[in-house]
Amino acid sequence: MTISVAVSGASGYAGGEVLRLLAGHPDVTIGAITAHSNAGSRLGELQPHLHGLANRILEDTSVENLAGHDVVFLALPHGASAEIAAQLPEGTLVIDAGADHRLEDPAAWEKFYGSDHAGTWPYGLPELPGQREALKGAKRIAVPGCYPTSALLALTPGYANQLLQPDDVVIVSASGTSGAGKAAKVNLIGSEVMGSMSPYGVGGGHRHTPEIEQGLSNAAGEKVTVSFTPTLAPMSRGILSTATAKAKPGVTAAELRSAWAEAYDDEPFVHLLPEGQWPATKSVQGSNHAVMQLAFDEHSGRVIVTCAIDNLTKGTAGGAVQSMNIALGLDESAGLNVQGVAP
Amino acid sequence: MTISVAVSGASGYAGGEVLRLLAGHPDVTIGAITAHSNAGSRLGELQPHLHGLANRILEDTSVENLAGHDVVFLALPHGASAEIAAQLPEGTLVIDAGADHRLEDPAAWEKFYGSDHAGTWPYGLPELPGQREALKGAKRIAVPGCYPTSALLALTPGYANQLLQPDDVVIVSASGTSGAGKAAKVNLIGSEVMGSMSPYGVGGGHRHTPEIEQGLSNAAGEKVTVSFTPTLAPMSRGILSTATAKAKPGVTAAELRSAWAEAYDDEPFVHLLPEGQWPATKSVQGSNHAVMQLAFDEHSGRVIVTCAIDNLTKGTAGGAVQSMNIALGLDESAGLNVQGVAP
Amino acid sequence: MTISVAVSGASGYAGGEVLRLLAGHPDVTIGAITAHSNAGSRLGELQPHLHGLANRILEDTSVENLAGHDVVFLALPHGASAEIAAQLPEGTLVIDAGADHRLEDPAAWEKFYGSDHAGTWPYGLPELPGQREALKGAKRIAVPGCYPTSALLALTPGYANQLLQPDDVVIVSASGTSGAGKAAKVNLIGSEVMGSMSPYGVGGGHRHTPEIEQGLSNAAGEKVTVSFTPTLAPMSRGILSTATAKAKPGVTAAELRSAWAEAYDDEPFVHLLPEGQWPATKSVQGSNHAVMQLAFDEHSGRVIVTCAIDNLTKGTAGGAVQSMNIALGLDESAGLNVQGVAP
Amino acid sequence: MTISVAVSGASGYAGGEVLRLLAGHPDVTIGAITAHSNAGSRLGELQPHLHGLANRILEDTSVENLAGHDVVFLALPHGASAEIAAQLPEGTLVIDAGADHRLEDPAAWEKFYGSDHAGTWPYGLPELPGQREALKGAKRIAVPGCYPTSALLALTPGYANQLLQPDDVVIVSASGTSGAGKAAKVNLIGSEVMGSMSPYGVGGGHRHTPEIEQGLSNAAGEKVTVSFTPTLAPMSRGILSTATAKAKPGVTAAELRSAWAEAYDDEPFVHLLPEGQWPATKSVQGSNHAVMQLAFDEHSGRVIVTCAIDNLTKGTAGGAVQSMNIALGLDESAGLNVQGVAP
């Protein structure tokens, strides 16, 4: 069986990463590759690392060019994906790597994105409780945001097992610059970012905050409140999230460890590291893995989980392909890099 | 007036930075430059950036070589500085860039450092309330740790003004690799650290935790509890600390802003940035400045202060020279870089 | 058919990269994984990016542990590989990623390595003229050095076609720090290498110089003399070589371009880029590709070829696996990453 | 005596670096600070590292705003500086950090810059033979290009002493990204440049080529031909040039070493390193120094000089301030950083 796939937004980082993975997927044929202002260009000019697709020509991102494939990946700015998605056939598997269909609460959408809510799709993070089942046979999938992927993987076992207090989560994340997109902005040029760490969107304003709260609240069965601070780190790829919450009274270190171990021991891509080993973004570079370590600071009463992912792979394109595999009943790991690229 | 100064630990990063600053200090003559295993070497081999001192020969770190100067800087491993310091004349100004004399509580020292407490010296962070006065005329000064410098500058105005709750501080810091010293360790080699973020000492185990709690508790007049997570970032220099605490009930954003503004408006080296501008470690590279921004996330009830310093300058050698200047009645800024080196 | 493979030197960068590629090779079963001082450790501690092999235990590097496999990869210090290789069965395919069997001239070996010459094996760079044929069925393969790989790919078409003068080749290469190995040395720590470019082995002393001369001389049919300067660049992976030689009188830009195009147009992994596009090491990161661009500076009479490879992939482990595939009659690209990992 | 200085192009990297140095210059008062599209902004927004000048407002770059100062620094695009310079009073010291007045040959200017030649000014590289004298009392100074600074310092002693052959110079340089300016271009964003080396302007097309040839030819007294290849390295600052030329017949290593030593032994900012020590760009970061090492490869007959500078300091703003100091009869080192900022 060969599945035909179209990829939009192919000149950006998310679209490029989707193509990188699909090019190695045994069950897939890459059909239309589309872009907006770069339509007509050779892919090799824009994504010179995609040697196997270098001579493909980018088509215009339009319903006409995307429809007619079994699967369509949307790696478009928010707003744009909802508009296109609404016009694609119901039988097509549409996977939105953008934000448009992640949030369940229209009010949260309007507050953070300032437009009408496009509706909620099944959430492409199969390691969340019940989520793998929910993705089977789905025809619409919302790929989680990169920060939410790391934060939800880090804390969900604690909330799903009623081990953490809901009212005081603090998450500080460091992201590689590819998270800010392939955008010609002075604050993103190498001379500015190399050797520098800086925060942005501090104080609850980052759009991934409601998405993190939604996921943790769903796991806890009660409203979880999050303080989230993203920072930009001098590296191209990777997210390291430090996620902390207060343990409920009486919870022990052993209970915590066993909850996380149980959640992830059978997962192919999410791992609680052996004690004494810390996660490093480099160890997941280019791979679909998430690695994490857990500590219980009895002095402050806080559980601290540090979790590393590659923002473009597990945090975007890898999660998208993994979800596609589940939706279509393929091997969940097909086309996904098992080993990271290090050093 | 020319002050004679000796610098020990001159082959390491802290000692090198002390020398860099002293070499440009108008009131100082650099006397003995000492090291341990590198004694006998030309400084230019070990610190090739110190062009003005390239032909100086490192002497052995001994009381004999250090005594007889007006000022002695100790940039030595903990334990070693206390031992030397105890033998230096009372009239000599001894400035310890190590940890031995920072903590007030012998029990905390023993818990985190595992040895006998060497006693407490005046704390070289003049921007803390009352601290500038305490340093005038001092003959012994404990230079704060690099993480505590950033964390205390970030949160002290809130505690000194009774605006923050004492029981739930969360601090996540990213440090450049020079904070880990000039040590031949595989986990510190460039191939490992470039492109990677990783945590360490998670769960309350980092030795700077009691030092941060001590400073905040002193400001608050009550015990403050801190969860502190350090991470290593792919850059040579700089610390970005994200420090958060819950606001006390009824506190407003305006009160918060004015407390921080009041604390730092007259400071030469510590700055609350204009609203809308975020701190970046690169903007303080090589300088003695700390820059910070404040946000009040009413949703989570948390105040978030992000603060950037250069770990080797304001975080170590710059703070040391600034404290020396105050102790000796010199211009507080003498020898200190006012401009950072960017990009 | 499943081929059993043993990998020695598995705790280092070259060995780790061999394992990364073999773990994705469809025709291979990874048998013994061996190391020297790290024998007994879990691979996941030493190579945390090799998630698929994390629980494998490193065995001691010995003939006993390596023999009995169809293929043995040696990623050992020079001297060590020759010693082991001499004891492995003749029928085993032995692939030496080290230097011991690359040079043809015993005198050159002795001059640059200071020991007895171990003999010459077929050279694992199949894109050189006639070399693919020479590797078919081979039982011993010497993997080229990383710098020679880039330099020989860059200039061989010119020499094989008698377009370049033999007496004045100048090559300047910039390598990522992984080329210096996973060694705990102060000059390799991140604090030293980030933000810094520096040369080493200048003046003809680098051991790869005779290997480059050997390859170019073989192509030219006369003695080619090379001035080679390696430099260390602040990145983990990648080599960019700038290789220049004087064109022979009367040679035209068109002749040059067509010689390179003809040499590589049918190659799966070596590419002359379209005019106007420059090679970048990032575009080949983690892949087995070499990309290059050619310029003819008529003013100076020099042909300049800039060539980018990943030093660990095409420059070491990828070239090794590609050669194994040819030797064993497998698909030449099996197990090799076609797409690079970027950004 | 206080000298009033105006700085144009203050929002860019070159202008920012001029300001950084002038802010620490004991004899200077900084007058107008001007920009083009950023006129009206606070300097602290655009150059957040210039803490001492943060509240200065950028004025428009115009003759009116620049005239009336003792010294005017022009850090403007080529073409723009010549236009402004032509309207400034003859008695004003005008220092052009741009290219407009560097070349002596109008034909070379027209070929490489495509416009009318604006004339030739004294060349601000005082370490060239006779050049320090030529700068004394000058009212117009052309600051050398960053690549030419490194290349001319590297090879001039050989040509001035008739030790090198004129017809086959090869120079390969690696520059930090600040050399490409503070420009919002996709190919310069951090995600693209981190972890990557790439060439540009290969084949003789870079505009610094005729400037290098001019300097070497002047030293040699005959026409010197250069092949120059610039590459972009993943660091913000610094140039490492590898410059090679054939030694004339009979020249010995000792003669070479003594020519370089003699040329630079009395120079405050240019140094031939002790044998065995290699230059590193980090050791000159933020300082006005150039460090170099010399090797004679008898096998290839080539002299190889590797030279490291900070492209923004010695390569632009430091050289400019040093030249100003000479022109005005000030201490040549006034305001110039003697120590580099490392690690």
Image (cartoon, coloured by chain):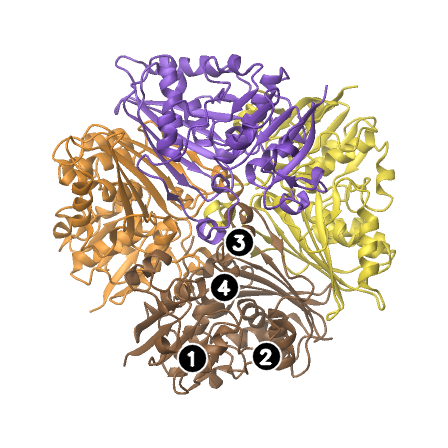
Chain colours: A orange, B purple, C brown, D yellow
Q: Is residue B171 left or right of residue C238?
A: left
Image quarter hosting the N terminus of chain D: top right
Which percent across, then down, holds residue C163? 66, 77
Which percent across, then down, holds residue C30? 31, 72
- Dot 2 or dot 3: first in sequence order is 2
Name the chain under label 3: C
Q: Amino acid at mark 3?
A: Lys
Residue with the mark numbered 3:
C185
Q: Amino acid at mark 2?
A: Asp
Residue with the mark numbered 1:
C94
Asked whether the residues under marks 2 and 3 belong to the same chain, the reply is: yes
Q: Is residue B59 left or right of residue A88?
A: right
Please say if A185 is above or below A20.
above
User: Which label belongs to residue C311?
Assistant: 4
| Disc 4 residue crowd, few under 14, some 14–19, many 20+, Cα 10 Å | many
Please say if B154 is above or below C55.
above
Q: Amino acid at mark 1?
A: Val
Q: Is residue C259 left or right of residue A40?
A: right
Name the chain under label 1: C
Secondary structure under the numbered disc 4 in the rendered image: loop
Residue at 31% x, 23% y: name it.
B245
Secondary structure under the numbered disc 1 in the rendered image: strand
- Dot 1 or dot 3: first in sequence order is 1
Q: Are marks 1 and 2 in contact (CB under 8 Å)?
A: no
Asked whether the residues under marks 2 and 4 belong to the same chain, the reply is: yes
Q: Amino acid at mark 4?
A: Asn
Disc 1 from disc 2: Cα separation: 20 Å
Disc 2 from disc 4: Cα separation: 27 Å
Q: Is residue B261 left or right of residue D247?
A: left
Residue at 78% x, 35% y: name it.
D323
Number of callouts in the render? 4
